[in-house]
Amino acid sequence: MASDAPLSLHWFLPTMGDGRHLVGGGHGNATGSAGTIRPADIGYLTQVARAAEQVGFDGALTPTGAWCEDAWLTTAMLVAHTERLRFLVAFRPGSISPTLAAQQAATFQRHSGGRLLLNIVTGGESAEQRAYGDFLDKDARYARTGEFLSIISRLWRGQTVDLDGEHLHVERASLSRLPDPVPPIYFGGSSPAAGEIAAEHADVYLTWGEPVEQVAEKIGWIRKLAADRGRTVRFGIRLHVIARDTAAEAWAQAQKLLDALDPETIAGVQAGLAASESEGQRRMRALHNGSTEDLTIAPNLWAGVGLVRGGAGTALVGSHAEIADRMTEYHDAGIDEFVLSGYPHLEEAWWMGEGVLPILRARGLWEPPAAVPEDAGVRSVPFAADYRR
């Protein structure tokens, strides 16, 4: 079912480091396995955030995990260096109390002018969770997430909350000041337990970049679960992107990224990912099965990123028009929001902003969050012989 909503476009903050080759990260994999790293300091992240803001992205996702900088602290620092960009802060319910999280979100909204979005991550792999003192198994983590989201949603409505749950217990919890606006909840997951939580609590359901037909199936699944509860949910997709003036240039860049990977690195990362508890990760691996052959799994959809990276492992690759065509197809399937990234994130933000976003705007699918000044076009410069004194 096609969406009638205009697209909302987000970029990504590489808080694990950035570079001209694929940078690892996610699900406990080592970072920096392929290429020189640009440190994820505030100076560089400010460049990425301001580039995303300037070209027209609405927000930027900041990941969570032992392999990257803390998302809350990093984005709080970046607020002062940006003007309107919203921050999609990923965090895990198992590492923070629901009352404190609700209070932090309210504080963030006040000091940022309402620029917080929240990406609830139920948990990574059990080994990483245990490093944070969380010893629940996967199903129990999802149950706890449901209790967590129930508490914070009630707190944001101004209620005083008492809950004696299976995993969480609060008494007389309340907030002295409410967030304005209430930050929307982004949530993803491919398991049955994840679907139940998304249908009950998510404002935006996020999926990783599978072929359009598979994405449409997931949208239908979540849409029905939400409708059974009298709710509606928006849908987003997480993808990497390589957009260039021509398809040949884009695919040459994808091949360059692939050529920089050595077989030992790929084998090591894939061995780790094969042991993942994540259903979404299993689906990502099934797109390539660890092989460097046949990585184009659908028109302009390349699975090469997932060879050395956990989490989102596919990229849209092609000319600006081809990327816009594929995004339009996802939109027709029901996707309202795109969370995009590329290597390096600074340069790729400009490729998207200058090449693809104007096409989406011309098609009536997207409008920039801030108006472009009418005199922003390039002015002609006369030849010397044409000057009039």
Image (tube, grey):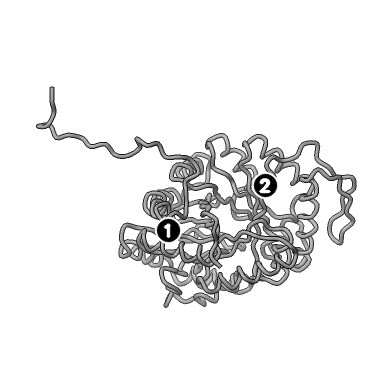
The relative height of residue 191 versus residue 331 in the rendered view (above or below) is: below
- Relative placement, left or right, of 373 versus 49 is left
What residue is rendered at 62% in x and 70% in y? 220
What residue is rendered at 63% in x and 57% in y? 204
Percent x, y for residue 161? 86, 48
Q: Residues within 10 Å of mark 2 (few under 14, many from 20)?
A: many
On residue 201, the disc is: none
In space, the residues marked 2 and 1 are separated at their CA atoms by 34 Å
Quadrant into which the N terminus falls: bottom right
Percent x, y for residue 129? 71, 60
Q: Looking at this view, is 232 or 178 the one in front?
A: 232
Mark nearer the N terminus (2 vs 1): 1
On residue 183, the disc is: 2
Which element is circle 2 on?
loop
Quadrant into which the C terminus falls: top left
Q: Looking at this view, is 316 or 311 the one in front?
A: 316
Tell me which corner region of the image, top left, top right, bottom left or bottom right, holds residue 257: bottom left
Query: Which residue is label 1 attached to?
Result: 21
Tell me which corner region of the image, top left, top right, bottom left or bottom right, holds residue 250: bottom left
Which element is circle 1 on?
loop
Amino acid type indicated by mark 1 = His
Q: Residues within 10 Å of mark 1 (few under 14, many from 20)?
A: many
- Relative placement, left or right, of 194 versus 12 is right
What residue is rendered at 31% in x and 57% in y? 245
- Relative placement, left or right, of 42 versus 122 is left
Amino acid type indicated by mark 2 = Pro
Percent x, y for residue 112? 62, 37
